[in-house]
Amino acid sequence: MTGLRSTTLPLPLCRRGKVREVYEVDAEHLLLVASDRVSAFDVVMTEPVPRKGEVLTQISAFWFRRLASLGPTHFLTADWREIVDRIPALASHPEGAGRSTLVRRTTPVPFECVVRGYLSGSAWAEYAAHGTLAGEPMPPGLPEAARLDPPIFSPATKAETGHDENVPFSRVRAALGTVADRLRERSLALFRAASAHARTVGLILADTKFEFGHDSSGELVLIDEILTPDSSRFWPLEPGEAAAHRSGFDKQPLRDHLARMKASGAWNGDPPPPPLSPDVITAMTTRYLDVYHRLTGVPLPEVS
């Protein structure tokens, strides 16, 4: 398999992110196209991960459809034939198939809505150092990957470069007023529903982040990708295994590989990144395809 590093479609390019190109369809609609680019430690790798963009797109589409009753979203379709019917100029650009999503245009809310069901990642790093999460005290003596019951709404700023910053809910409320309460309520409801489904297929949703925006009428809508292995931690539900050491379904093989290179002095953490071996790339593709299959119940369809 070969990966797709970037796309050039016959639409105005709004922006190119670490993973996605965002194209303007018209004044009310955008086309989000997920490449197979992969990043770690805030550095985009040279080699793409085959089918990664398809997995991110189609898992998001699965969740947008499944969770539609929990509130409005920007999602319209990720079906390539439907997209081409609406945008005929794309008919001669099959590289967009399987990895494109047609959405309603919105004005994004300037906070990421993180929900944590377990103490992991940046939350664990802060807690281990200070006993807090986003500056707010937590119970003492919690181990890494401790279950947080009930789950915690832990918002973060959106960083243009570098890492996002966990912030207290009070800061979000000061900036957004009552919208902050609606963000928290919807985020927790989405997390609970997604977590319940994940457990039925043998997975734990450890944490995730949601993004929201306001559409042209001012309505608050769920946007961006949702509940993918890039925006979430999914762990296998295996009794007796310590949660802190669960093998997740994301780009952890890449993080481990790069961490070893940094520890050995073979890479200083700055661009350009070191080349990735075929084994690391294959391991990531396998994980992305596996979590898609587990969540949806079917293998990822081949692009026709």
Image (cartoon, grey):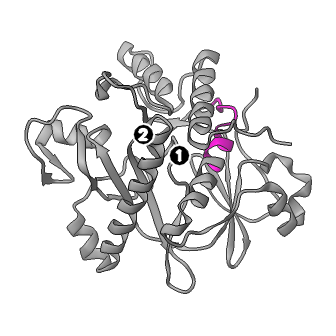
Residue kind at label 2, given as amino acid type: Arg
Location of the N terminus (image quadrant):
top right
Which quadrant holds the C terminus? top right
Q: Quadrant of residue 199?
A: top left
Question: Earlier along the polypeptide chain: callout 1 or callout 2?
Answer: 1
| Residue, disc 1 | 228
Q: Residue at x 76, y 29 (%)?
A: 2
Residue 209, how many percent across, how many down?
A: 42, 53
Q: Give 218 or 6, whichever is nearer the viewer.
A: 218
The front one of 53 and 63 is: 63
When the figure is inspected, residue 73 is found, relative to residue 206, above or below; the finding is below
253 vs 50, left or right, is: left
- Mark 2 lies on residue: 233
| Chain part drawn in magenta | 46-57
Give neighbour class at mark 1: few <14, some 14-19, many 20+ (Cα, 10 Å): many
Residue at (22% x, 61% y) in the render:
168
- Farthest residue to the left: give it: 140
Circle 2 SS class:
strand
Q: Is residue 256 left or right of residue 240?
A: right
Residue 75 occupies quadrant: bottom right
What percent of the width, then of the height, locates residue 230?
51, 42
Q: Is residue 133 left or right of residue 40?
A: left
Q: Is residue 66 left or right of residue 243?
A: right
Residue 144 visible from this viewpoint = yes
Inspect the magenta stretch and tell me whether residue 273 lies in it: no
Looking at the image, the residue that sits furthest to the bottom is 217
Residue 48 is inside the magenta segment: yes
Q: Amino acid at mark 1?
A: Thr
